[in-house]
Amino acid sequence: DINNLAKEVIRPWIDRCFLSSGFGDSPGHQFCILRNGSWSLPRVRDLPPLPTRVIDVGLKDQDISLRVRKPFFPGDKYEQDPDCAQYLILSYCWGRSNETAKTTKSNIQERMKRIDIGSLPKTIRDAIQLTRALGERYLWVDAVCIIQPVDGDNTDWLAEAPRMYAYYGNALCTIAATGAVDSASGSFIERPAQLFPVVSSALRPWVTTATTETVYIHPSTPLWWNAVVSAPLYKRGWATQERALSPRILHWTEHALYWECSGMRASEYRPGGLTVEESSVHENLQKEVHMNLGSIMKYSRSENLCWAWYRFIERYCWTHFTYSSDKLVALAGIARRINDHHPDQYAAGLWSEKLVEGLAWHTRYYTSGGPQRPATYIAPSWSWASVDAIVKFAVVGVDAWEWSARVIQV
């Protein structure tokens, strides 16, 4: 029952993380609140500004609609502005079943009055149901809340794309349809029925010790890598930014519900937290396909940041984009957030302070016919982003290099 799960498992996860962030009473959660950067709007009573548009989910069985945030003007009394509120945000694979979700210039006026919830794909309907179950009112979904390009008119997308880093960073929680291959699959994936209830079993210890000990056998659950990192969602390039920028994430997989924040990883089977073996802790960036942005923020030395960034790019190149031109766009929010904490010039996927190291890349794997140059310009030829291929950086995995080159100008 989603209502019981929301009340007994999910809400305690959110409260434990959100209420502990920044106050030091719960170790590890100090990185769970990441303030938005240069595209910033003031917070009201520590509530974030709403995105330009959100879905107002209302109450059970009520109509839903698009809510447009009022514009902010100098001199506004922000403390009285109602457009600062908590909201949830959805990360999912579109697939070919997302056409009915799209807001366009032709239907936006109607959707501001009412959205036919039955016309939306199952993944979005599930997210609406969960938002209601958690007692929240607002949900952001890209296809619904951004006016989709029609006949080459992508004006709204160009305006909203740079703001997505703030949208994900400010959200109370990200609902990730991690195990769904498209928007028709749904977040709440049906699992194989179990003939008998699953319980932990106590065994007598084989070795007698001075103290009384009991050995327990717990039901096996999939490793974090298999359940989350290798899931369909994180083969999608845009999901990299969405995961990296989200302070709190609910991963809905085919095996179980998982929780992720900078302070803890947990599952519905182990709500108190996963073991190191189960979670492949996020400080171990060389084993992660996607980084947790909080881990990057902890690096104070540029060498460590450089190593983590280029290792991340190596893994990022394994993801897929419908349009190669999105490759750097989907990284922009991450780079912007890192630059807020580590000021440096960002250039086509590289950092100027460690530009020489960033130039030492080569293609590693490719599908067929060698690495491909995109038909349209994406990045300078010296950037890893200029080719559609898996890349490898010489600096990654090596303790020390002596560089004879120096950067004159970027």
Image (cartoon, grey):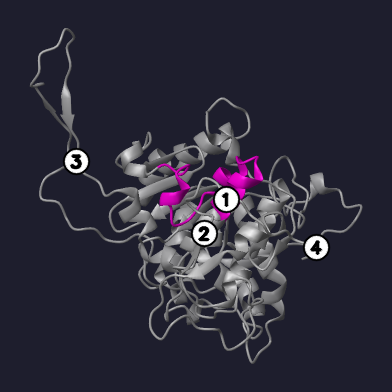
Magenta segment boundaries in residue numbering: 281-309
Q: Amino acid at mark 1?
A: Trp
Which residue is at a point 59% across and 35% down the rendered structure image? 30
Q: Position of residue 118 (x, y in %)?
A: 44, 73
**Residue closest to the eye, 396 or 321:** 396
Which-is-in-front pick, marks 2 and 4?
Answer: 2
**Residue closest to the eye, 204 or 289:** 289
Residue 397 left/right relative to 207: right
Distance (Cα) linking label 4 and label 3? 52 Å
Mark 1 lies on residue: 401
Mark 2 lies on residue: 394
Which-is-in-front pick, marks 4 and 1?
Answer: 1
Distance (Cα) linking label 4 and label 1? 51 Å
**Dot 4 or dot 3, earlier in sequence:** 4
Distance (Cα) linking label 1 and label 3? 47 Å
Which residue sits furthest right?
75
Residue 280 left/right relative to 303: left
Mark 4 lies on residue: 71
**Residue closest to the eye, 145 or 224:** 224
Which-is-in-front pick, marks 4 and 3?
Answer: 3
Q: Amino acid at mark 4?
A: Pro
**Dot 4 or dot 1, earlier in sequence:** 4
Q: Are marks 2 and 1 in contact (CB under 8 Å)?
A: yes
State yes or no: residue 302 in magenta. yes
Which residue is at a point 59% across and 67% down the rendered structure image? 330
